[in-house]
Amino acid sequence: TGAFTQVAGTGTTTLASMIGVASLSATTANIAVSGGTQLNSTGEITLTSTSNTLVFSGTSELKANEGDGNINITGNVTGDANDNAEVTFNGTTTIDGNIIGTAGSGIEQLNIEGGNLSVGSLNIAGSVTSDSGSDVEATGNEGIAIGGMATLGGNLSTTFATADIGIVVSVSLTDSMTFSTSDGMVNIMGAGGIDGNVGVDLKFDIIATVTGAIGPSLQNLIVTNGKLTADSINITGNMTIDAGSEVEASGNNGIEIAGSATIAGSVTSAGNVTISDGVTLTRDATVYHDIIHTADQFIITGNLGVDTVPGGMPGDPRVNLFTNGVFDISGAVGSNLDLLEIQTGSLQAGTVDLTGDLVAL
């Protein structure tokens, strides 16, 4: 029930389960946390490896004050190469070193619970799960690389100037979160893309590429900085694109927004863009495919510039614009618009320049 203290040494200290102690403090050359271990203290956990090696095996958990305490680790955290480890940090965790679990290094699952994780770099071949409100931040130049799936309830960020975030499989969100870097990029490489619980918001403050789709269960999508490229976007709520930001859907399924869109940046889609509620564009917009507008009002305070399909020849009009509501454009519409069809409602614009037909039903 008292404090556990391990003095500095040259050998390896192997830690087994200890539950209910006041605090845990181990300082030695190497530290091994054996399989099945639960280190559960009512206070702080401090593990210091003087030779920079902490090896976890099996299923191990470090819990500080039922998740409300601090866990401080000095040294690199890795897994036993012969025993794929599941490692859980339950508390506000600071690691002065890196989490290394690449192929053959043995971390199959990393769980972040109870508080935030701050680490030099996170590079594992396995998967990562974080609780709601548990943020993960990498401060070193190697950023974050997750070889498996990321199930996230908190933010994921890097702070070193060029450090990236890479996730090989897919992302599932259990709570609203933000991807951010200082000047790096996000790359979600799996065909599963990004989705999650209904009502969850997704925010990008970063240049990001998502190989698969975003949605369809997510609520709101916010892009505040850089360019977001995804195969398709399908959300149940609203989309907001800040000034200077870009959103591109590269696949044929395009963009489908069940709510409203506020766009101060630009939107490009290889497929249709369908917006079921009001749209406010606060700058010029260029579209590369049909816009299907089904809301009461589509407001553009700049120009609606219409260009050819990417790779098409200039003057090769392939873009149609349909509206079922009031389409109010302060600036101009055109000039490579092939078909403008007003099915119901009205179109108001400064000028309209068509290469094809105007149909008012």
Image (cartoon, rainbow, N blue to C red):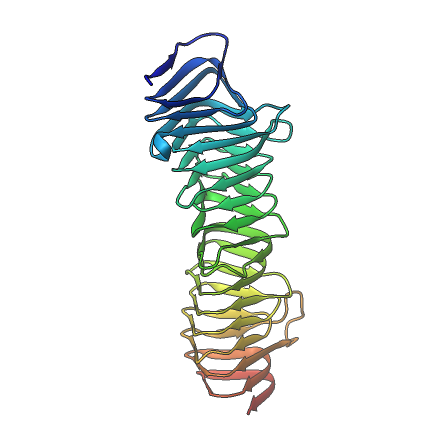
Image quadrant in which you'd find residue 213: bottom right
| Residue 241 placement, left or right of 187 | left
Q: Specify the quadrant that holds the C terminus.
A: bottom right
Image quadrant in which you'd find residue 308: bottom right
Of 238 and 55, nearer the camera is 55
- In the rendering, at what x and y percent does residue 71 appear? 38, 28
Q: Is residue 169 above or below residue 302?
A: above
Residue at left 61%, top 45%?
Answer: 169
In this view of the protein, can residue 227 be seen by the observer?
yes
Residue at the limit of the structure toward the top, as seen here: 10
- In the rendering, at what x and y percent does residue 153 appear? 45, 46
Residue at the limit of the structure toward the bottom, as seen here: 361
Of 11 and 306, nearer the camera is 11
- In the rendering, at what x and y percent does residue 295 appear? 46, 78
Q: Specify the quadrant that holds the N terminus.
A: top left
Q: Is residue 112 above or below residue 359?
A: above
Residue at left 63%, top 62%?
Answer: 251
Residue at left 45%, top 17%?
Answer: 49
